[in-house]
Image: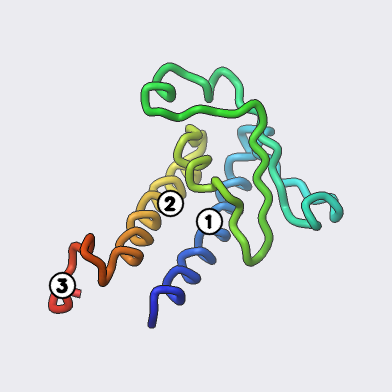
């Protein structure tokens, strides 16, 4: 198995997890409602998220998380929206499912970095330990 196969597996899991994250969070936050009118964004699912005061906090600014006036995320069955990782990590999850998926995204990002670094001078593993 090579790096591209592993990255594809991770990408597919992230797409599924993001859809579940949006569905779970939309039960308590109407801004996370998944929309699809069949025309916009080439018929892909999308979210138009307008951040409010609960997102733009001093704590978020200290962590270096800044929101634009409108965040639009659109995705299909085989492609993850650009900025999904940062969106999930900077948004405060309001459900237990959302919090769980947020922690899974952190883990997947760490695995993704390790896969990219494997075989380079930045790699933490030797061939014996891998």
Residue 43 x, y percent position in the rendering? 80, 57
SS for tag 1?
helix
Dot in front, 1 or 3: 3
* Callout 1–callout 3 Cβ contact below 8 Å: no
* Callout 2–callout 1 Cβ contact below 8 Å: yes
Q: Quadrant of residue 63?
A: top left
Q: Farthest residue in the bottom direction?
A: 1
Residue 73 x, y percent position in the rendering? 65, 45
Q: CA distance from mark 1 to mark 3?
A: 31 Å
Is 89 or 117 nearer to us in this picture?
A: 117
Q: Quadrant of residue 52?
A: top right
Chosen colour scheme: rainbow
Q: Which residue is mark 2?
A: 105
Q: Is residue 67 left or right of residue 130?
A: right
Residue 68 x, y percent position in the rendering? 60, 28
Which class describes the residues within 10 Å of circle 2: few (<14), some (14-19), or many (20+)?
Answer: many
Tell me which numbered mark, 3 or 2, is placed earlier along the sequence. 2
* Callout 3–callout 2 Cβ contact below 8 Å: no
Q: CA distance from mark 3 to mark 2?
A: 26 Å
Is 116 or 6 nearer to us in this picture?
A: 116
Q: Which residue is mark 3?
A: 126
Q: Which residue is mark 1?
A: 17
SS for tag 2?
helix
Name above or below for residue 4 compared with residue 34: below
Tell me which numbered mark, 1 or 3, is placed earlier along the sequence. 1
Total numbered labels: 3
**Residue at 23% of width from left, 60% of height from top?**
122
Which class describes the residues within 10 Å of circle 1: few (<14), some (14-19), or many (20+)?
Answer: some
Which class describes the residues within 10 Å of circle 3: few (<14), some (14-19), or many (20+)?
Answer: few
Tag shown at residue 92 = none
Q: Is residue 115 left or right of residue 84?
A: left
**Residue at 58% of width from left, 45% of height from top?**
24
């Amino acid at each position: 198995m090579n790096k591209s196969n592993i990255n594809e597996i991770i990408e597919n899991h992230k797409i599924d997890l993001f859809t579940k994250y949006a569905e779970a969070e939309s039960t308590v936050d109407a801004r996370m409602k998944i929309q699809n009118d069949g025309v916009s964004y080439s018929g892909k699912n999308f979210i138009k998220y307008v951040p409010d005061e609960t997102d733009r906090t001093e704590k978020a600014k200290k962590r270096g998380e800044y929101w634009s006036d409108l965040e639009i995320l659109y995705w299909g069955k085989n492609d993850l929206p650009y900025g999904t990782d940062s969106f999930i990590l900077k948004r405060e999850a309001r459900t237990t499912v959302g919090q769980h998926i947020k922690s899974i995204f952190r883990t997947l990002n760490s695995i993704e970095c390790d896969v990219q670094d494997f075989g380079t001078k930045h790699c933490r593993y030797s061939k014996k330990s891998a």
